[in-house]
Amino acid sequence: MALPASPFPNGCAAGIHAVGWVLILPCFWFLDRLIAVCKSTTLERTQRLEQECYLHPLKVFFGSITFFILFLLTTPFAFLGFLLWAPLQACRRPFYYHRETPASLEQETHRGFELTGKASFGFASANLCLLPDSLARFNNLGDTQRRAAVIGERIVQGVCRPHIRIFVDSPSSCGTLSPSNSMLPTSSSTYGATDRQPPTPQGPESHRSAPRALLSQGLRQQDDVPWEVSSLFPANVDILCLEEVFDKRAAQKLTDELKPVFGHILYDVGVYACQPPCACNSFKFFNSGLFVASRFPVLEAEYNCFPNSRGEDALAAKGLLCTKLLIGHNQKQKKVVGFFNCTHLHAPEGEGEIRCEQLNMVTKWIGDFQSVHRQHDEEVAFDVLCGDFNFDNCSPDDNLEQNHCLFSEYRDPCRAGPGKEKPWVIGTLLEQPTLYDEDINTPEGLQRTLESEDLRKQYVSPPVPAAGLPLVYPENGQPWIGRRIDYILYRESSVSSRCRTEIEEMTFITHLAGLTDHIPVGLRLNIVMDSVSNE
């Protein structure tokens, strides 16, 4: 049974909620602009110097006065809207569901298991920092609405291209190979000058029937994991998890851009105000920021809010979103499903105990969700957990999280052990002050930088030392990796016993250079389902 689109039980509640938000929005927008006009990104400051613009102080002065007056004038209307909006949060389901109506039901499912007994699935995760513009600027990222539209365009551009791969035999062969770029529309690759030229989206049926043979950007293999640094989003991503999509208008822009390719989208995920009563520890001004886009129908979805957030993190309803997706049928016409879970953990450094408690909750909530929604007449093809965990596997300060039992259940393709990354791994957190430097402000430039250890040290955030102790990093003979806080994990113990899973490729993605302070990651899994039952 398909999920209803609206998070409200009836049209009356939805209408009153919409009226309340319309009354709140002008006041909220003027406050946002009041702060934004006073806070510039390094890109804006550089542009003013190059243009020898000396009017900025006047813009700040008169802009601040104007927006402050408008904020005061709209405050009474916002208060009235709040009185309508806040009580309705108690009856609001914690997400919206957008579904594109397909031409046929077969276009929403994967026929690989039914026809050949095997299938390949692509997953990607990215933190986008789509906060209200004023708050995003504290992370050196501005123009949230435009960024959202450009991000959506780039994701569609990448996932709709043919999947062509070139294998590089030696890890030392790190030259930038990008023959796929010639197959894409030409557009400016720096943020702020991107022309709107999205390709014609491919439907789910065509993306599964197209040959997958040739390129990405030079696939390499060390130990058991093929990997690459790609200047494009991986082709044929099936499920996309995005974090920090806090701004509602930005979420809608992303939905509009992605829906021709990803027909099933969960957005505005999380709770607001103080509901459910006493379930969260403070008033929630922002949702969870989680956003899931899938080519497959969502059969079930459940969100849980972390009750132990603290400080500025407590203003957002961070938590866990669990989904159950309809993949298709196997050769015996038995339904095949997949479980996809995403989360965003507590952010401040030095508070590993809170993150460990949240990991305990994640493990429990996923188990509870699957025990309720897993049916005996279904085959489970995959169980994936991804998101921004806000800790890495190399910082001494993150030792508690690195040793959490979650990693004995879910496999991390990049992890050699607690506190030790595999040598080919690349950190995913960029230093915010340098986001617009020439070396990393384009997808191709960021790709070249990440493939050079000397350059990578300048732009990827270094490990966090333990309190009161000097940092010794890296160890002798080990590469400099940096903080990898974005994860895609998978579990084999919870899938059907007839399924065998292997990693096809792991990808570090530079396609969103200049648009976010994180490096997105991708994972593609090959799954073979035995035709003979073990039951």
Image: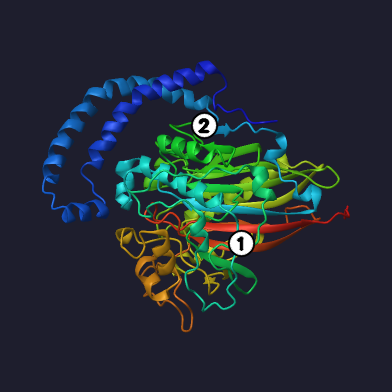
Give amino acid for label 2.
Pro
Residue at (36%, 42%) from the top-left corner?
A: 146
Is the residue 490 above or below the residue 465 in the image?
above
Q: CA distance from mark 2 to mark 1?
A: 31 Å
Seen from this angle, which residue lies furthest top? 12
Disc 2 is placed on an element classified as loop
Residue 111 percent coordinates (x, y):
75, 46
Residue at (56%, 33%) from the top-left corner?
A: 98
Residue 205 percent coordinates (x, y):
68, 43
| Depth check, front residue: 191 or 201 | 201
Q: Which residue is mark 1?
A: 407
Task: Please tell me which of labels 2 and 1 falls first in the chain.
Answer: 2
Q: Which residue is mark 2?
A: 276
Is the residue 85 above or below the residue 129 in the image?
above
Kindly report which numbered mark, 2 or 1, lies closer to the viewer in this rendering: 1
Residue 514 percent coordinates (x, y):
36, 55
Disc 1 is placed on an element classified as helix
Is the residue 96 above or below the residue 430 in the image?
above
Give amino acid for label 1.
Phe
Give the quadrant of residue 49: bottom left
